[in-house]
């Protein structure tokens, strides 16, 4: 009988010790092992934060989240997060309670970055909060922006370049060659005209000079018979004729120089057309080939970018549903009823 009582006492003591150990372990895990000080912060997004979420100070555990209270301010929803830390723990002014995670699969924590202030916050004070950055949302946003850029900017730009190149090509093949031909014909006509004028002007000048000599001789003969009043008029007429002869001589010289310039211009035009014809045609062919190649590959480029965006989105969705895939696990079985 005594042995049975001893066994009962031993078993009861062991069970009691296990219960005490369980309570102590739970208390240690929840951080409620002693007196605490309360603080609060405000977030716009509390994804991953709940009651019992660990509160760290520069990575060192000091408390836990106690309560999350939604509140509205100026038409915008905010969330007040009340948390407790170990009694007497000093939190400097300017500290920031940042929602963070030590790894991709690690639990979300509230990590307090120590502020530069010398004074400490009083218990119950507000600690500035900052939400965690969502890398998957950022990647999805970048992929969407790239797709929009390709559809709205790259394709229209390539189409405009193709139209411009086609226009320039048609201009170079048609209008420019026709213009060069017209310029060449005009230069030839001007050269012939200048040559003809240069040949005729000396004869005209000689004839005028001969006529002037004859006029001078006749005027000398007439002056003997003319009155002094008529003599003055005749002298003015002769002076005018002399000025006209000098003007014709200057015109002949100017036309000769003009003919020389036109000859040089015609030679330059012929040389430019003959030397650059092959280069211009080759440049047009190369440019058209480049534009056609870009136009052919822009659709495949856009499809690859869209496929990459869909793959990134699917990757992020599967990781959110089953983080164990990164460690070589398999996705959870589909429990939905098959149709």
Image (cartoon, grey):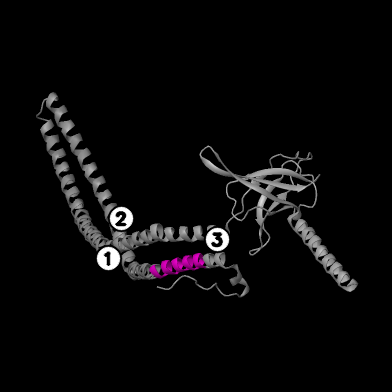
Q: Secondary structure at mark 2?
A: helix
Q: Where is residue 168 shown, x and y percent of the image?
A: 31, 61
Q: Which residue is mark 3?
A: 136
Q: Is residue 236 left or right of residue 297?
A: left
Q: Is residue 307 magenta?
A: yes
Q: Is residue 191 left or right of residue 82?
A: left
Q: Residue at x 38, y 59 (%)?
A: 157
Q: Is residue 204 magenta?
A: no
Q: Nearer the viewer, residue 113 or 165?
A: 113
Q: Is residue 284 above or below residue 226?
A: below
**Magenta stretch bounds:** 299-314
Q: What label sits on residue 261 in the rendered view? A: 2
Gap in Å between the C-alphas at discs 1 and 2?
28 Å
Q: Which residue is mark 1?
A: 173
Q: Nearer the viewer, residue 9 or 239?
A: 9
Q: Callout 3: 10 Å neighbours few (<14), some, many (20+)?
A: some
Q: Quadrant of the C terminus?
A: bottom left
Q: Callout 1: 10 Å neighbours few (<14), some, many (20+)?
A: some
Gap in Å between the C-alphas at discs 2 and 3?
73 Å
Gap in Å between the C-alphas at discs 1 and 3?
53 Å
Q: Where is residue 32 shown, x and y percent of the image?
A: 76, 52
- Mark 2 against mark 3, which lies toward the viewer? 3
Task: Choose the circle earlier in sequence order: 2 or 3.
Answer: 3
């Amino acid at each position: 009988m005594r042995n049975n009582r001893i066994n009962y006492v031993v078993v009861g003591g062991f069970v009691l010790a296990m219960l005490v150990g369980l309570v102590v372990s739970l208390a240690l895990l929840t951080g409620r092992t002693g007196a605490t000080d309360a603080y609060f912060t405000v977030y716009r997004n509390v994804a991953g934060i709940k009651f019992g979420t660990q509160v760290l100070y520069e990575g060192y555990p000091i408390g836990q989240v106690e309560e999350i209270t939604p509140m509205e301010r100026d038409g915008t929803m905010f969330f007040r997060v009340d948390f407790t830390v170990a009694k007497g723990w000093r939190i400097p002014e300017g500290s920031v309670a940042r929602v963070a995670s030590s790894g991709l699969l690690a639990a979300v924590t509230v990590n307090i970055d120590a502020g530069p202030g010398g004074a400490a916050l009083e218990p119950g004070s507000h600690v500035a909060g900052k939400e965690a950055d969502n890398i998957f949302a950022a990647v999805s946003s970048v992929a969407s922006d790239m797709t929009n850029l390709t559809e709205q900017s790259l394709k229209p730009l390539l189409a405009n370049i193709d139209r411009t190149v086609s226009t320039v090509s048609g201009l170079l093949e048609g209008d420019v060659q026709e213009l060069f031909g017209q310029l060449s014909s005009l230069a030839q006509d001007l050269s012939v005209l200048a040559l003809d004028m240069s040949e005729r002007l000396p004869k005209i000048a000689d004839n005028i000079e001969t006529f002037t000599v004859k006029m001078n001789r006749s005027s000398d003969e007439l002056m003997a018979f003319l009155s002094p009043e008529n003599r003055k008029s005749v002298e003015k007429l002769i002076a005018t004729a002399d000025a006209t002869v000098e003007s014709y001589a200057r015109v002949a010289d100017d036309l000769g120089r003009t003919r020389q310039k036109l000859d040089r211009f015609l030679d330059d035009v012929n040389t430019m057309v003959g030397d650059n014809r092959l280069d211009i045609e080759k440049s047009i062919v190369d440019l058209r080939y480049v534009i056609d190649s870009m136009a052919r590959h822009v659709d495949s480029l856009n499809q690859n970018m869209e496929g990459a965006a869909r793959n990134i989105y699917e990757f992020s969705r599967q990781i959110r549903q089953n983080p164990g895939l990164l460690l070589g696990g398999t996705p959870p079985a589909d429990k939905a009823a098959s149709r």
